[in-house]
Image: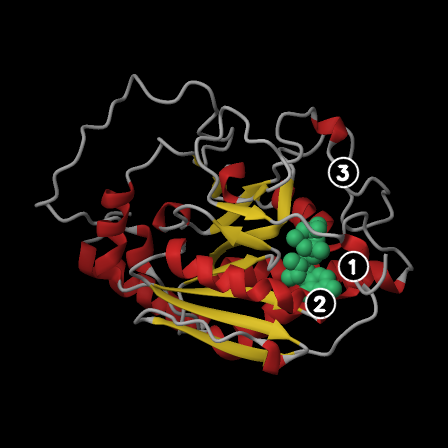
Amino acid sequence: MQLSNGKTLTLILLSALLLGSEVHIESHHLVAPDSLQYKQPSIVSGRTDVVAVTPWLAPVVWEGTFNPVLLDSIYKPQNISIAVTVFAVGKYVMFLKDFLETAEQHFFIGFNVHVYVFTDQPTKVPQVKMAAGRQLTVCSVPSSKRWQEISARRMELIQTLIEEKLQNRNDFIFCLDVDSKFHGRWGTESLSGLVAVIHPGYYRDDRSRFPYERRPESRAYVGPGQGDFYYCGGAFGGLLQEVHQLAKTCRSNFEADAKEGIEAAWQEESHLNRYMWINKPSKVLSPEYLWQDFKPRNPEVYIVRFSGVVKNYAEIRPNV
Ligand code: UDP
Ligand code: MN
């Protein structure tokens, strides 16, 4: 069907009205300022030591595959805003200061960022000076005696946060582990509908070694010969609507499993991996986006942008 641009737009807006949701037409339409000059992109030379596209043609973001200045100038005029969720329950409040301070140095610099801190100790949230356009909201959550439960409840809280506070206010959301620090740029190159991060611990392994949930009774089950990559539970994101769908699905699968007495091998990380197997991420972030401090940097990792700190589990978790 051939339609004029005006008619197409009216149709899109009309269907959005009918669906009762806001459309983000701009997010899918990449408009660059014509005054911008930058290095000519090559179509025949680039990184050859890593794979930069998935079999379903989603980009895999590695240093050297994108132009940060170009991407920022495309997204800047759209005045987008990025929500971040971070959980700090029990002793994990000690990680907040470094997380928040390093986010101020590296995470979406120059963009609107709204950090939501979920904690059982609001008075212990450190005061960190934030740049213009950036803000923090503290949300109270109950404490828990089991770390598995804290970790698992994140999906439920992300789902309700999006439903109750974020609709029509933010465009994108990233859900991050608190026991980590930013060391390098994490910005507009990470934006897409559904964004997953490759886990640094398994990315060179055969899929048979991935720690997916292997019991068919679980709703997080991924069978032999299935699974693309092993993704992190400690970082994921995308458009609000996409992350809402993910959180809602993982939460309900987690709860249905729990009713039958099953807890997936790696709690919500297992459910996230099941979800991403069926719902392919539209962008995949390389392990540059969640490294682990104890791991020596591999040669294909030119830059570590975000990394989990070394921690003593016995000391910080409420149970072992
Ligand atoms: N978490 C928390 N308190 C706890 C355990 C976990 O706040 O007692 C949150 C915190 O945001 C943490 C995330 O759940 O980053 C995932 O847990 P953890 O980082 O211990 O898992 P790992 O990265 O070691 O697999
Ligand atoms: Mn962690």
Given residues 312 and 3, the one toward you in this image is: 312
Q: Secondary structure at mark 1?
A: helix
Mark 1 and mark 2 residues within 8 Å of each other at the beta carbon:
yes
Q: Residue at x 66, y 32 (%)?
A: 202
Mark 1 and mark 3 residues within 8 Å of each other at the beta carbon:
no
Choose mark 1 or mark 3, whichever is in front: 1
Quadrant location of residue 113? Answer: bottom left
Given residues 113 and 41, the one toward you in this image is: 113
Looking at the image, residue 173 lies above or below residue 120: above
Q: Amino acid at mark 1?
A: Glu
Classify mark 3 as within 8 Å of ligand 1 or not, answering yes or no: no
Which residue lies under the disc numbered 2?
A: 91
Which residue lies under the disc numbered 3?
A: 211
Q: Splitting the image into four quadrants, where does ligand 1 fall?
A: bottom right
Given residues 76 and 121, the one toward you in this image is: 121
| Distance Cα–Cα, label 1 vs label 2 | 9 Å
